[in-house]
Image (tube, rainbow, N blue to C red):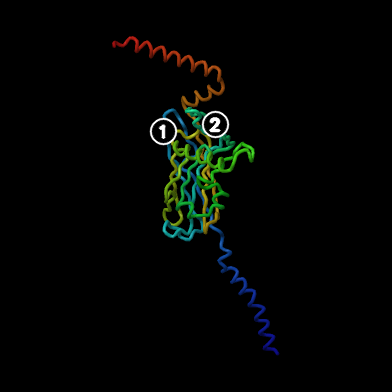
Amino acid sequence: MRSLLASLLLMLLVAPALAQESHEASPADDPAATVEADVSTRSLEVTTGFTGHEIVVFGAIDNSEAPTNGSGYYDVVVVVEGTPLPLVVRRKSDVGGVWINTSSVTFASVPSYYAIASTRPIEEIAGPAVLERHAIGMQHIKMTPSTHKGAIEDYELAAFRSAVIRLKKSQNLYVLEPKDGVTFVGRSLFRATIPLPANVPVGPLVARTYLFHNGQVVSAHIARVTLHRAGIERLVHNFAFVHPASYGFIAVVLAIASGLLASAYFRRRPS
């Protein structure tokens, strides 16, 4: 009887310790991986001689398990997006041999700039639902139409969306970096280079960095870059918006003066 009581007492003392040890060793309780990122510059001046720039998004993964380009244990996607602006898209049609605007769609919100870089093609990183939720990828850019629902068919709206993306790409305002746009340096450090063209709209840019694991976003980080006018361009811009009538009058006078000078110059040239 005493032996049985001693065995029961020993089990009661040892069981909590074993349960605590098992709980501490459980991999499910390991802290989740997180991503920290930043940009190479927080402020960028746009002057009359601005020919474009490159910003570097860099960061590190905390609690990583030696991710490499080959293993693909973690995937990183960097999205740089400009200020959403309203945009009117018009479609031209041949009417009696004359190309005229026959239909249009007004989008209340279209990113003025959009660039994406990733460790792999985004289609291999996550499914369409996840990409749509986080607005990752050209096909998932958020464009809010002002047209009431039902006023335009879905296939027509998709055609206008595709036209916006095609035009923005031709202007180098929508950029999709090729494979390995985000590269790992060592165990957990990564970097991505995002090009800004000379015609990038002036305003704030948002750099969103996503950490993917098994097709899901496990962490995200946001950094901001501000593009602002400087020098003569800033003075002219401010004058145009503060004194629009005076700016218009001066512009007309300069145009007329330029035309008269050009006419006088070519008239005096010997034939």
Name the element at disc 2. strand
Q: Nearer the viewer, residue 94 or 216?
A: 94
- Quadrant, the N terminus: bottom right
The Cα atoms of the two marked residues, 2 and 1, are separated by 36 Å
Q: Provide residue 79's location: percent of width, then percent of height.
A: 50, 45
Q: Mark 1: which amino acid?
A: Thr
* Residue 158 screen position, x and y as percent: 54, 42
- Image quadrant for the C terminus? top left
Residue 215 sits above or below residue 54 on the image: below
Decide if residue 54 is on the left or right side of residue 157.
left
Instruction: Write down the residue under mark 1.
Output: 51
Q: Position of residue 190 (x, y in %)?
A: 45, 51
Q: Nearer the viewer, residue 225 or 115?
A: 115
Contact between labelled residues 1 and 2, with CB atoms less than 8 Å apart: no
Q: Which residue is mark 2?
A: 102
Amino acid found under the numbered disc labelled 2: Thr
Across the whole image, how many numbered discs are drawn on residues? Answer: 2
| Circle 1 crowding by C-alpha within 10 Å: few under 14, some 14–19, many from 20 | few
Q: Earlier in the sequence, mark 2 or mark 1?
A: 1
Q: Residues within 10 Å of mark 2 (few under 14, many from 20)?
A: few
Q: Nearer the viewer, residue 67 or 10?
A: 67
The furthest residue to the left: 271
Q: 186 above or below 115?
A: below
Identify the element where label 1 is drawn.
Answer: loop
User: Could you tell me which residue is drawn at 43 percent across and 46 percent down?
Assistant: 177
Q: At 43% from the left edge and 48% from the top edge, which residue is drawn? A: 181
Question: Which of the two marks, 2 or 1, is nearer to us in this view?
Answer: 2
38 sits left or right of 268 in the view:
right
- Residue 11 shown left or right of residue 221 in the figure: right
